[in-house]
Image: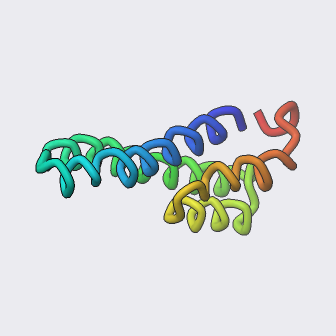
């Protein structure tokens, strides 16, 4: 479960950097390359996070409901942080790893 927790943090952080740093740089300071690079990194992390969730669900380490909550959380700013603190916190890491 440690890997899913880290992926949740990375994906959530990349979304926040995209929304609150890269997009203002693009629209307020005319630097579109910030969104290009951060957007690509966020896209890779978004897809990876959701593939990991799917993989853990198919292996039985997460229920389908837990994985779906993670999928929904990945669309919302701060969502993956809340997901990690609520849903993933309830899972015993000694059993799931």
The residue furthest front is 28
Left or right side of 10 for 79: right
On the image, the x and y values in percent for residue 75 come to 49, 64
What residue appears at the point 61 percent right and 58 percent down from the top-left corner? Answer: 79
- Relative to 2, 91 lies left or right: right
Coordinates of residue 1 in the picture (x, y in percent): 72, 38
Q: How many marks?
A: 0
Q: Percent position (x, y) of residue 45?
A: 42, 44
Q: Residue at x 69, y 32 (%)?
A: 2
Q: Nearer the viewer, residue 63 or 32?
A: 32
Dividing the picture into quadrants, the one containing residue 8 is top right
User: Which is more toward the observer, 56 or 10?
Assistant: 10
Image coordinates for residue 39, horizontal then vertical, percent = 28, 49
Q: How is the image coloured?
A: rainbow
User: Residue drawn 76% across and 33% down?
Assistant: 97
Q: Is residue 15 left or right of residue 92?
A: left
Relative to the observer, which residue lies in front, 38 or 96? 38
Give the answer, above or below, for where 1 lies relative to 19: above
Horizontally, residue 31 falls left or right of residue 80, namely left
Identify which residue is drawn at 14% across, 43% down. 33
């Amino acid at each position: 479960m440690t890997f899913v927790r880290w992926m949740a943090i990375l994906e959530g952080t990349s979304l926040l950097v995209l929304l609150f740093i890269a997009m203002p740089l693009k629209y307020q300071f005319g630097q579109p390359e910030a969104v290009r690079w951060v957007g690509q990194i966020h896209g890779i992390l978004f897809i990876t996070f959701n593939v990991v969730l799917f993989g853990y669900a198919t292996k039985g380490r997460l229920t389908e409901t837990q994985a779906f909550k993670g999928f929904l959380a990945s669309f919302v700013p701060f969502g993956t942080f809340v997901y990690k603190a609520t849903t993933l916190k309830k899972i015993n890491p000694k059993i799931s790893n």
